[in-house]
Image (cartoon, grey):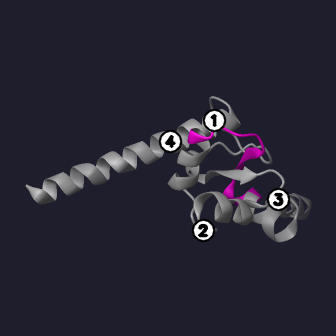
């Protein structure tokens, strides 16, 4: 019996976390969430980005640690009433923006197109 309760709880938490993530992505990215940079629509690739940067500092101050993210961040955004300053980006655009301050994969696609 105990195992079943644990499994049921884990499944419930997974559903709740997905629901919260979808609510946040739809709020910041429209009914059918889309990357603001490259128009990607695959939900598994989309995430929330701080428009002006500063995500580590904010998570440290608001959530108690800069490594706290994911469902904690989605739940916090819902609790705070969807504050301004966030956008939906795919992970490629987000990492490209972080590492290169540009749309890295867009530049890569342009180079590939010129080679063809």
Q: Secondary structure at mark 1?
A: loop
Could you say which is closer to the camera, residue 46 or residue 9? 9
What is the CA distance from the residue labelled 1 to the residue labelled 2?
21 Å
Could you say which is closer to the camera, residue 91 or residue 110? 91
Near mark 2 (Cα within 10 A), the count class, few <14, some 14-19 or many ≥20, is: few
Could you say which is closer to the camera, residue 45 or residue 9? 9
Q: Secondary structure at mark 4?
A: helix
Which residue in the structure is indicated by mark 1?
A: 81
Furthest residue to the top?
31
Q: Is residue 39 magenta?
A: no
The range drawn in magenta is 79-93
Location of residue 92 (image quadrant): bottom right
In the displayed structure image, the side of residue 99 where residue 16 appears, left or right: left
Q: Position of residue 76 (x, y in %)?
A: 57, 47
Identify the residue at horizontal 78%, vertical 45% (top origin): 85
Near mark 1 (Cα within 10 A), the count class, few <14, some 14-19 or many ≥20, is: few
């Amino acid at each position: 019996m105990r195992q079943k309760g644990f499994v049921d709880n884990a499944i419930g938490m997974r559903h709740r976390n997905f629901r919260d993530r979808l609510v946040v992505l739809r709020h910041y990215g429209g009914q059918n969430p889309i990357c603001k940079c490259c128009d990607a629509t695959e939900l598994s690739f989309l995430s929330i980005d701080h428009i002006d940067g500063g995500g580590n500092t904010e998570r440290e101050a608001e959530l108690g640690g800069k490594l706290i993210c994911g469902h904690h961040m989605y739940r916090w955004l819902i609790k705070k009433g969807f504050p301004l300053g966030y956008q939906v980006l795919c992970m490629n655009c987000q990492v490209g923006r972080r590492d290169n301050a540009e749309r890295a994969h867009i530049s890569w696609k342009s180079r590939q197109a010129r080679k063809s």
